[in-house]
Image: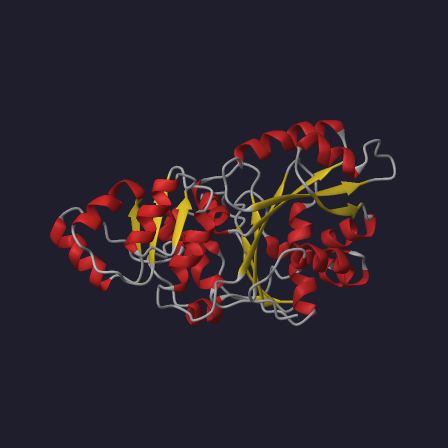
């Protein structure tokens, strides 16, 4: 619960005795009850109230649902499978916004050179062009900085080194004022002076503010998840794992997927193909046991444009615009603007 409340930028109060339980039951925005304690609350004659959630190891047990109904609970959730559901529920009642948090998409490379960062930037540029309010968060300290891909390394504004000491709750308006903008996209890039960890506290403070001030948040994730990246993954609705149609890349991607086992996000695959690829995207998907969300054709012009700082303009001229739209729209977007 501590981790989930950090993602939602909400204060956690743990009630350990009868007096604290009674006080929190009356005053808390949301009450989360362990299934093992539901009986004790019933015997204590707790008054029915809205916004009560029961968490259980096995939500299929009939007795859990029966006890939760008697308590007036609205949901029975199983953690960690329902982490994202609970995070969104907490965030919606934390007093920060009357709207659900922005749809959050994580993009991670299954193998080196797959083009995950290029895809993350492309999604942002394409959705901004379609009229959405978009924020790109760089969560890969060793990635070189997404501002280079946006051609915005000289654009003024905060980078992660400026916010690494952030703690607690960051006002969405304050974050909006300090983030740089390029090509219609707000972005927070890692620095290039060092590959220091971003910090769990900083990510837990910044990410919820970003989700409250945009229609779409895209997180460029590292292949090896550090604690800060794990905070970001917990908030993602969808994880796009990008790989290439090569045998070694598929083997490497299997390790990345193993590290993501147990997350609550919808994990799908984007396969980058080449005219010399012997594997078909469907075969890659079947081998990894992950649904295929899209196919990214190798485009040497995009690689050249990225090196020259012209990637956003090249994206607008490429098929990536359609792919980016398809990847975002394939699931329901609670705050879609376009």
Identify the residue at image location x=76%, y=59%. Answer: 322
Q: Vertical placement of 309 versus 249: above or below? A: below
Which residue shows up at 53% across the image and 33% down it?
A: 259
Residue nearer the viewer, 251 or 13: 13
Residue 319 occupies which quadrant of the picture? bottom right
The quarter in which the C terminus is drawn is: bottom right
Asked whether the viewer can see residue 162, the reply is: no
Image spot of residue 30 (x, y percent): 31, 59
What percent of the width, then of the height, locates residue 324?
71, 57
Which quadrant holds residue 286?
top right
Residue 208 location, x and y as percent?
43, 59
Above or below 239: residue 184: below
- Decide which of 104, 276 is in the foreground and name it: 104
Choose between 267 and 312: the one closer to the eye.
267
Identify the residue at the far left of this view: 19
Going by the picture, which residue comes out furthest to the right?
A: 275
- Residue 239: tell me if it is visible: yes
Direction from residue 167 to residue 203 in the image, left or right: right
Q: Residue at x 51, y 65 (%)?
A: 179
Residue 216, how many percent across, how many down? 57, 62
Q: Residue at x 46, y 52 (%)?
A: 85
* Residue 125 falls left or right of residue 195: right
């Amino acid at each position: 619960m501590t981790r989930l409340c950090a993602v939602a930028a909400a204060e956690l109060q743990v009630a350990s005795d009868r007096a604290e339980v009674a006080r929190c039951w009356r005053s808390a925005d949301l009450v989360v009850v362990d299934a093992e304690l539901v009986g004790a609350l019933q015997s204590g004659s707790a008054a029915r109230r809205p916004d009560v959630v029961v968490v259980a190891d096995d939500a299929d047990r009939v007795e859990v649902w029966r006890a939760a109904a008697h308590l007036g609970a609205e949901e029975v959730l199983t953690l960690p499978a329902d982490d994202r559901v609970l995070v969104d529920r907490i965030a919606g009642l934390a007093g920060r916004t009357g709207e659900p948090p922005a749809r959050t998409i994580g993009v991670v490379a299954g193998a080196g050179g797959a083009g995950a960062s290029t895809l993350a930037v492309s999604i942002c540029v394409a959705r901004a062009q379609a009229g959405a309010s978009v924020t790109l968060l760089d969560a890969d300290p060793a990635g070189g900085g997404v501002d280079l891909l946006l051609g915005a390394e000289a654009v003024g504004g905060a980078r992660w080194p400026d916010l690494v000491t952030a703690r607690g709750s960051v006002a969405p308006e304050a974050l909006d004022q300090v983030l740089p903008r390029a090509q219609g996209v707000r972005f927070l890039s890692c620095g290039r002076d060092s590959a220091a960890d971003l910090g769990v506290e900083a990510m837990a403070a910044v990410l919820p503010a970003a989700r409250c001030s945009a229609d779409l948040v895209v997180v460029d994730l590292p292949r090896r998840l550090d604690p800060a990246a794990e905070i970001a993954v917990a908030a993602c609705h969808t994880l796009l794992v990008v790989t290439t149609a090569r045998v070694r890349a598929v083997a490497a991607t299997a390790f990345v997927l193993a590290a993501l086992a147990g997350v609550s996000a919808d994990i799908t695959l984007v396969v980058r193909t080449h005219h010399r690829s012997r594997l078909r995207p469907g075969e890659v998907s079947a081998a990894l046991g992950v649904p295929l969300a899209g196919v990214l054709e190798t485009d040497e012009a995009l690689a050249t444009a990225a090196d020259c700082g012209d990637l956003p303009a090249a994206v607008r001229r490429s098929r990536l615009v359609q792919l980016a739209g398809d990847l975002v729209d394939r699931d329901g977007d609670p705050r879609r603007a376009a």
